[in-house]
Amino acid sequence: MTVSAAGLGLVTHPDYLLHAPHAEFERAVRLEHVLSVFQTAGVFDRVVRVEPVVVPEAVLTAVHRPEYLGRLAAFARAGGGAWSPDTVLSPESYDVARLAAGGAVAAVDAVLDGRVGRALALVRPPGHHAGPNLGTGFCLINNVAVAARHALRTRGIERVLIVDWDVHHGNGTQDVFYDDGDVLFFSIHQAPLYPGTGWLTETGRGRGEGRTVNVPVPPGAEGRHYRRAFEEVLEPLARAFEPRLVLVSVGLDAHRLDPLAEVRLTVPDFAWLARTVRRLADQVAGGRLVGVLEGGYHLAALGASLLAVADAWGNLGLAMAEPPGEPAWPAPPADLVDEAFSRRLAELKAVLGPFWPGLRESGPEAGGSQGNGR
Ligand SMILES: [Zn+2]
């Protein structure tokens, strides 16, 4: 079957299974399960396979400090073990982490070169908790950040929007770009939750002022809250920022069955998120859209949710099914979740208002119609 250049590029590599294969949560079976689900659904026959590339040292060190990379490489190659309380390395981990970043870079290149319309990199280890000098939260090298810096510095792309919908705050990505005016970083995540950062008052510094946008959702948040955040904050900001490329940290751990969080998204919600960023990329970034796998720790939910993303980005026309089961956590009362979310969204708009003049008028919560009378 011929796949047009407007189709979906898919990056993966067998070596991604070699990093800490038997770790407690972020383990090789996650990716094995995803690949098996994609195989069964016939995805591989209908996408363009893209091979990871070797990331040049200069691009890696544009994100991470050379001393950090040196320590990480030496620790892994000496046999690995517990790198941090939650992150285990095998001897292959450093090389695999570089190859994961190379998967994200290859996905960006395939899109920028017009070989594919959009691309999805199925990699591990994930990256969004890895900062310039820090590898934690199952992350070693920040794949999305490396891909963004590659696009900006090597490919001459002027502005990059990073959307991080993993249920945990993308603290590493935020740290890398906190004072960078060329990257708009939008993270929607549960708070309180690991890693404890990502409050809505964290908005960037210097040239990056206003270009870090955090939407901390309360436990129990559902698809309707994500819709409001995307429609009332992400979309107007993306239109004003005019990115030339949209990168997505595709975490699937905001699914209602995920054991590490208490957000209640469903497979159709992930399909909606994927369709929305696709439409946004089409409208503001010439369609240039690349997703990179982050978290997701309930196997069935991970596979089904990621399939929904691939379906939305590749026009695959697949049948979607919500995995059976009930969340392990009791649902907080819906009115309390609504109230907490609305309060946070209003506060976020007030905090961002000085940087984004168009934001106040957007969405039903606009208010503040000074001088207009009633
Ligand atoms: Zn996560």
Image (spheres, rainbow, N blue to C red):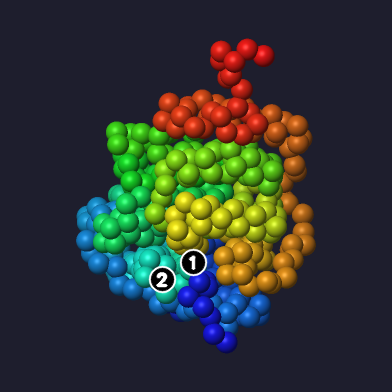
Q: Is residue 253 visible?
A: no
**Measured from the top left, where is residue 178 in percent x and y?**
35, 40
**Measured from the top left, where is residue 368 in percent x and y?**
58, 19
The answer to whether the residue labelled 2 contacts the one labelled 1, judged by CB atoms less than 8 Å apart, is no
Which quadrant of the figure has residue 108? Answer: bottom left
State which quarter of the image contains the C terminus.
Answer: top right
Residue drawn at x 39%, y 54% as measured from the top left = 244
Secondary structure state at the residue bearing disc 1: strand
**Measured from the top left, where is residue 42 in percent x and y?**
63, 80
- Vertical order, 44 against 96 (above or below): below
Instruction: Inspect the image, locate mark 1, and give the three-letter code of the amino acid beneath it.
Output: Arg
Report which residue position mark 1 lands on. 118
Label 1 CB sits under 8 Å from any ligand 1 atom: no
Report which residue position mark 2 lands on. 114
Residue drawn at x 30%, y 36% as measured from the top left = 207
Q: Estimate how packed mark 2 is, as few (under 14), some (14 to 19) or many (20 or more) residues with alpha carbons within 10 Å.
A: few
Secondary structure state at the residue bearing disc 2: loop
Label 2 CB sits under 8 Å from any ligand 1 atom: no
**What whole-number distance in Å separates the C-alpha atoms at marks 2 and 1?**
9 Å
Q: Is residue 37 visible?
A: yes
Residue drawn at x 60%, y 42% as measured from the top left = 231
Residue drawn at x 41%, y 30% as measured from the top left = 355
**Measured from the top left, where is residue 262 in percent x and y?**
65, 46
Which quadrant of the figure has residue 146? Answer: bottom left
Q: Residue furthest bottom?
A: 1
Instruction: Inspect the image, locate mark 2, and give the three-letter code of the amino acid beneath it.
Output: Gly
Is 191 placed left or right of 321 in the picture? left
Mark 2 or mark 1: which is in front? 2
Is 72 placed left or right of 302 in the picture? left
Is 347 placed left or right of 76 in the picture? right
